[in-house]
Image: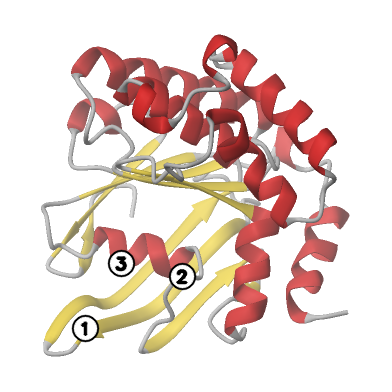
Amino acid sequence: MNEATLFQADADADADAGAGAATPGTTLAQPILSVRGVHRSFGMDTALRGVDLDVFAGEMLAVMGPSGSGKSTLLHILAGVLTPDSGTASYRGNSVSDLNEAARAELRLSEFGFIFQFGQLLPDLSAVDNVSLPLLLAGQKRKAALRQAATWLDRLGLAEHAAKLPSELSGGQAQRVAIARALVTAPRVVFADEPTGSLDSFSAEQVMVMLTELSRASGTTVVLVTHDARTAAYADREIVVRDGRISGAGA
C-alpha cells in the first residue's frame, strides 16, 4: 500500500461521516484540512508567514484578500500542489507535506477536485470528454466514464452542449463544465480558485448556486478563493489573507 492509498483507507473508514460531520465551533469537530506554522516564499517574495488554519468536513470556506496577499498560495498548499518551506499541511490528520510528488498527485486525483478562474478546460476536447477525463485518469473504462460525465452535464443543465468544444461555450457554461469535472469523481474536497472571476454577475450567481447546492447535497468540503464579497457570501465562513497572514473571526 503506497502513501496516497493510506489516505484513501482513512477516508473509506469514515465514509459515513460526511452527512453528520461536526461543524466549526463544536468541541468534537475534527478538521479535514490543516496547516500549522506554514511559511512559503518565491525567491525574495514572501507569500505566507506562519499561517495556521483548520478547514472542517462539509463546510464551505471563503479565503479572501487582495491580489498578491497569499490566498492562492495557501489553497495550493492545502491541496498538495505546493509544499511549504516550513510548517506542515495535513489532510485527515496525515501530513501531505511529507508525501513525494507522485503520492501527492495520486491524492489530488482520488480525493480532491479543482475549479479555476478560466475553467482550464482542454480546448481540443468536447465538454463530455473534459468531464470524463478525471475518471479516465483514475482507470475507469471509457464507456462508463462518458456515461457518468453525461449524467453530470445533464444535472447542470448542459446535456445539449455535451459535444461542444470549450470555444463554443459561454463563460458560464464553461464554468459549469468545470464544476462537473471537479465533482464527477465524488471528491471529498473541492478547491475553487476565483471560480467566478471571469464571469458576469448573472453567470457568477448561477455557478455559485450550483456549486453550493451540489456540495451541500454530497457533503463535499469547498475551499473557495475569491476577492468578491458577493461570491464569499455563499460560504459558511470567511477568512482574510493579507500580507501572508490570516485575519478574521473565522480564522
| Mark earlier in primary sequence (3, 2) | 3
The amino acid on which the numbered mark 3 sits, given as a three-letter code, is Thr
Q: Can residue 220 be seen in this view?
A: no
The amino acid on which the numbered mark 1 sits, given as a three-letter code, is Phe
Please state the horizontal and vertical placement of residue 60, each as a whole percent of the image.
46, 38
- Residue at disc 2, secondary structure: loop
Name the residue carrying label 1: 42
Name the residue carrying label 2: 81
In the rendered image, the vertical position of residue 117 relative to residue 167, given as above or below: below
- Residue at disc 3, secondary structure: helix
The amino acid on which the numbered mark 2 sits, given as a three-letter code, is Val
The N terminus: image quadrant: bottom right
Residue, x 70% and y 43% (percent of image)?
Answer: 185
Is 13 situated left or right of 206 in this image? Answer: right
Please state the horizontal and vertical placement of residue 107, each as a whole percent of the image.
66, 66
Q: Which of marks 3 and 2 is in front?
A: 2
Name the residue carrying label 3: 73
